[in-house]
Amino acid sequence: MLIYIYFSLFLSLSGLLVFTLKRKHLLVMLLSLELIVISIYLNMYIYFSQINYEYFFLMFFLTMSVSEGVLGLSILVLMIRTHGNDYILSFSSLW
């Protein structure tokens, strides 16, 4: 069980590292956020299995994370349609 905790910690730290270092493209940022969500899901699964709790809250968490992913993809599609690329630095909210 301890190796799963270390693996989940590695996933979340690598997701945070990619999110901070590769902030040029919106798609890479969204993928790193989804990696962080998956590591949180793994942490919650390990925690709930250790205390013999029901997994209903995990289904609620997955539903919210899917809706968050869909919202991010819709923003990505809107940005590509209006600006032609997904570079964060070329996006200006002033006009």
Image: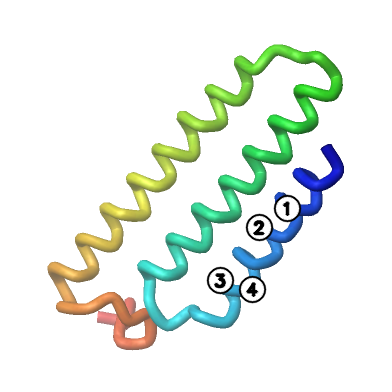
Q: Residue 37: horizontal and vertical position, in percent?
A: 57, 47
Q: Secondary structure at mark 2?
A: helix
Q: Which mark is residue 7?
A: 1
Type of amino acid at the residue the image marks with label 3: Phe
How many marks the image carries: the answer is: 4
Q: Are marks 4 and 3 in contact (CB under 8 Å)?
A: yes
Q: How far is mark 3 from mark 2, CA to CA?
A: 12 Å
For discs 1 and 4, the disc positioned in front in the rendered view: 1
Up the image or down, 19 lies above or below 34; here it is below
Q: Which of pointers 3 and 2 lies earlier in the amino acid sequence?
A: 2
Q: How far is mark 4 from mark 3, CA to CA?
A: 5 Å
Q: Secondary structure at mark 3?
A: helix
Type of amino acid at the residue the image marks with label 2: Leu
Instruction: Give neighbour class at mark 4: few <14, some 14-19, many 20+ (Cα, 10 Å).
Output: few
Q: Residue 2: horizontal and vertical position, in percent?
A: 86, 43
**68 on left or right of 12:** left
Q: How far is mark 2 from mark 4, CA to CA?
A: 10 Å
Up the image or down, 27 lies above or below 51; here it is below
Query: What residue appears at the point 28 percent right and 75 percent down from the top-left corner?
Result: 86
Q: Which mark is residue 11?
A: 2
Type of amino acid at the residue the image marks with label 1: Phe
Type of amino acid at the residue the image marks with label 4: Leu
Up the image or down, 55 lies above or below 42; here it is above
Query: What residue appears at the point 38 percent right and 71 percent down from the top-left corner?
Result: 26
Q: How far is mark 1 from mark 2, CA to CA?
A: 6 Å
For discs 3 and 2, the disc positioned in front in the rendered view: 2
Q: Which residue is mark 4?
A: 17
In the rendered image, the residue lying farthest to the bottom is 90
Q: Are marks 1 and 4 in contact (CB under 8 Å)?
A: no
Q: Which residue is mark 3?
A: 19
Instruction: Give neighbour class at mark 3: few <14, some 14-19, many 20+ (Cα, 10 Å).
Output: many
For discs 3 and 1, the disc positioned in front in the rendered view: 1
